[in-house]
Image (tube, rainbow, N blue to C red):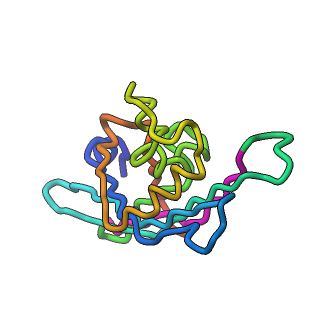
Amino acid sequence: MKLWPYLLVIIASLFLMACGGGNGESSSAEARYRITVTVDDNGVTRTGSSVWSWKLSKPTLALAAPYDGAFHGEAVMVDMGDGQMLFALVTGADGSPGTVRLIPERLFGDLGRGMAGERKRFKNDRVADMRDIASRIGEQRQIDCAAKINNCPMLVTFGDID
């Protein structure tokens, strides 16, 4: 199965589902969200989804980096019929694990606003930004992976699923 025809029509949707940081923690925040991959397979719409989470925290001693991040999630599987499965991996299309992990911030937060040349709302406080992102339950965005490949998961298929 050739991947390129599918890559051009993949749309990923994020549905923010849960709020983090509401328990009094001021040094961390977590967004849990559903990622749905939709494929137009010659006029047949095929979808698969999974729940991912991205948690940011400020370390007690920021020696290496000002934030610690923890990603949790599994690949999204899309049944393409005839025993073929398309997987949207937790690695970005560019091969970087950070690409996919930053989806909430790139789509809903200051990272995305800064990349678009807009004014940031939280003055570079990523934890406050993540807390704001997590509070917007039900908000969703779509990504056309043909147009914005840098925000998309790596897509793969296997000749033999085993």
111 and 162: which is toward the camera: 111
Residue located 30% across and 34% down the image = 147
Q: Residue at x 22, y 56 (%)?
A: 41
Image position, residue 149 (x, y; %): 40, 37
Q: Front-most of 52 and 19?
A: 19
As for residue 9 lying within the magenta part, the answer is no
Q: As drawn, is 150 to the left or to the right of 141?
A: right
Majority secondary structure in the magenta region: strand
- Determine which quarter of the picture holds residue 43: bottom left
User: What residue is drawn where x is 44% and y is 42%?
Assistant: 151
Q: Give the total of numbered labels.
A: 0
Q: Residue 135, percent across and down?
A: 43, 64
User: Is 94 drawn above or below residue 88 in the view shown?
Assistant: above
Task: Name the residue furthest bottom.
Answer: 23
- Comparing 11 with 65, the one in front is 65
Q: Residue drawn at (34%, 42%), measured in percent from left and top?
A: 145
| Observer able to see residue 85 | no
Question: Which image quarter: residue 14?
Answer: bottom left
List the single residue furthest toward the top.
117
Quadrant, the C terminus: bottom right
Query: Does the magenta-highlighted stretch encompass residue 68?
Result: yes
Q: Is residue 8 visible?
A: yes
Horizontal arrangement in the rendering, residue 110 relative to residue 70 (left or right): left
The x and y percentages for residue 27 are 69, 58
The one of 161 and 39 positioned closer to us in this rendering: 39
Describe residue 117's horizontal placement relative to residue 21 as left or right.
left
Image position, residue 65 (x, y; %): 77, 40
Chain part drawn in magenta: 67-80
